[in-house]
Amino acid sequence: VVTYLILAAGTVCTEVIYLSYNGDLKITWGEACTTFGTFCRKATASVAITFAALLCYILLSLLSSHRLFSTFAAPCSAAYAGR
């Protein structure tokens, strides 16, 4: 759940950064990074940190599942139990 929340926050923040750098002329929203340069630099750093945290959660999840499933033996099915 936390991984999906971080992914959602990262994608929304990426969209805001994209609009801040490029604007959207269809809705007459100009780019804002020339005026608010500090905001754009901090927001870009925040997006990078968010996706780094997402990669850490994915890595931890893979390591955790590997350790869990390598600890226990696979269950035998009923068809092979009699052999």
Image (cartoon, rainbow, N blue to C red):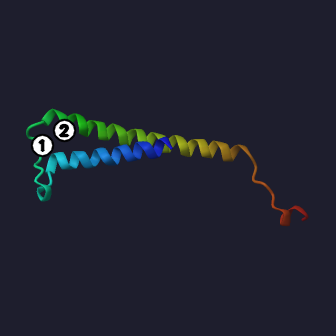
The amino acid sitting under disc 1 is: Ala
> Residue drawn 38% across and 40% down?
52
Give the residue number, with chain letter if any, for mark 2.
40
Dot 1: few (<14), some (14–19), or many (≥20) neighbours within 10 Å? some
Residue furthest to the front in view is 27
Q: Position of residue 80 (x, y in %)?
A: 84, 64
Q: Position of residue 75 (x, y in %)?
A: 78, 54
Q: Position of residue 66 (x, y in %)?
A: 62, 46
Q: Which one is nearer the viewer's eye here, 72 or 12?
A: 12
Indicate the secondary structure of the residue bearing disc 2: helix
The amino acid sitting under disc 2 is: Cys
Nearer to us of marks 1 and 2 is 1
Q: Which one is nearer the viewer's eye here, 73 or 14?
A: 14
Indicate the secondary structure of the residue bearing disc 1: loop
* Circles 1, 2 touching at the beta carbon (< 8 Å): yes
> Residue drawn 35% across and 44% down?
10
Q: Earlier in the sequence, mark 1 or mark 2?
A: 1
CA separation in Å, label 1 and label 2: 8 Å
Determine which of the numbered discs, if any, sits on residue 71 in the image. none
Give the left or right position of residue 78, taking residue 60 as reference.
right
Give the residue number, with chain letter if any, for mark 1.
32
> Residue drawn 34% across and 37% down?
49
Q: Which one is nearer the viewer's eye here, 23 or 42?
A: 23
> Where 37 sits versus 29, above or below?
above
Give the left or right position of residue 45, taking residue 70 as reference.
left
Q: Position of residue 6 (x, y in %)?
A: 41, 42
Give the left or right position of residue 9, taking residue 67 as reference.
left
Image quarter in which the C terminus is found: bottom right
